[in-house]
Amino acid sequence: MLITFEGLDFSGKTTQANLLLARLRGRGEVVHFIREPGGTPVSERVRTLLLDRSTPDIHPIAELFLFSASRIQLVNEVILPAIRRGETIVCDRYHDSTTAYQGYGRGISLEAVRTINRLATEGIDPDVTLLIDIPLDEIERRRTAAGLPADRMESGGRSFYERVRAGYLELARSEPARILRLDGVAPVEEISRRIWGIVEPRLLPPGRHP
C-alpha cells in the first residue's frame, strides 16, 4: 500500500506522516518512510541540488526533470520492491507535488507534467493521498515562529505559492476518491485521528498480505 502526504511547506504534513508511521508500526505493519526528493543515494544528491539556495538558477523544465529523475530512482529502488513484498510505504511528497509545484506553480504544461509523472512513477499511483492544506498567512506565521530561512523552493514568493495551493485544491477536486483534503490549521491530534480514520479501513487485517 502506498500512502502519500502532500501540502505546502510548513503545513505539518511531515509531522502527520510520522504520527501515522508510529500507528502503523504499532499495529505490526512493515512500513517504509521515505521523502521526496530523496530516499536513495542518487535521489538525496538531487535533493541537495534542488533545495540549496546557493544553487544557480534552475530552468523550470530542468527542475521538473531533476525531481522526476530523483523519483524514478526511488520508485525502482524502494517503492516497487516494497509493494511486491506486500509492505506499506508512507511517502512525504510524490508526483502530486510535481503537478502542483512545476505544473501549476511554474506554469509548465499540465499535459507534459502528467506524461513525465507517468514515466517517473512506472504508472504507480498512491492508494491514498492526504493533502494537509493551510492558508499562506499560516505558512508565514509558522516559518517566522520556527526562525528558519526559506530553501530554494520556499523562496518562490507568495504568488507562486498561491498557484501551488490552488493546484493542490484542484487536484483534490479532480480525484476525490484518492486525494483527501484535511485542514492543517486544526489541532495536530485531531488531524492525526482523522487520518487514521481514513487509512485504517483500507488496511488488510494484521498478519495478512496480498
Image (tube, rainbow, N blue to C red):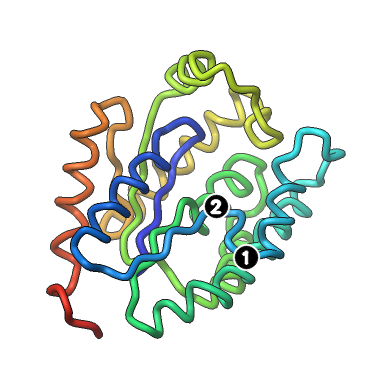
**Numbered disc 2: secondary structure:** helix
Q: Quadrant of residue 147?
A: top right
The residue that appears at 83% across and 34% down in the rendered structure is 54
**Mark number displayed over residue 99:** 2
Quick one: quadrant of the C terminus? bottom left
Q: Position of residue 37 (x, y in %)?
A: 61, 54
> Which residue: 59% across, 22% down?
148
Check disc 1 and report the residue beneath it: 40
Going by the numbered disc 1, the residue's amino acid type is Thr
Distance from disc 1 to disc 2, alpha carbons, whole Å, reads: 22 Å
Q: Is residue 131 left or right of residue 37?
A: left
Is 138 on the left or on the right of 44, as rendered?
A: left
Q: Position of residue 26 (x, y in %)?
A: 21, 58
Give neighbour class at mark 1: few <14, some 14-19, many 20+ (Cα, 10 Å). Answer: many
Q: Position of residue 53 (x, y in %)?
A: 77, 33
Outermost right residue: 56
**Residue visible at 52% across and 54% down?**
35
Assign a secondary structure to mark 1. loop
Residue flagged by tag 2: what amino acid is it? Answer: Thr
Vertical side of 188 occupied by 23: above or below: below
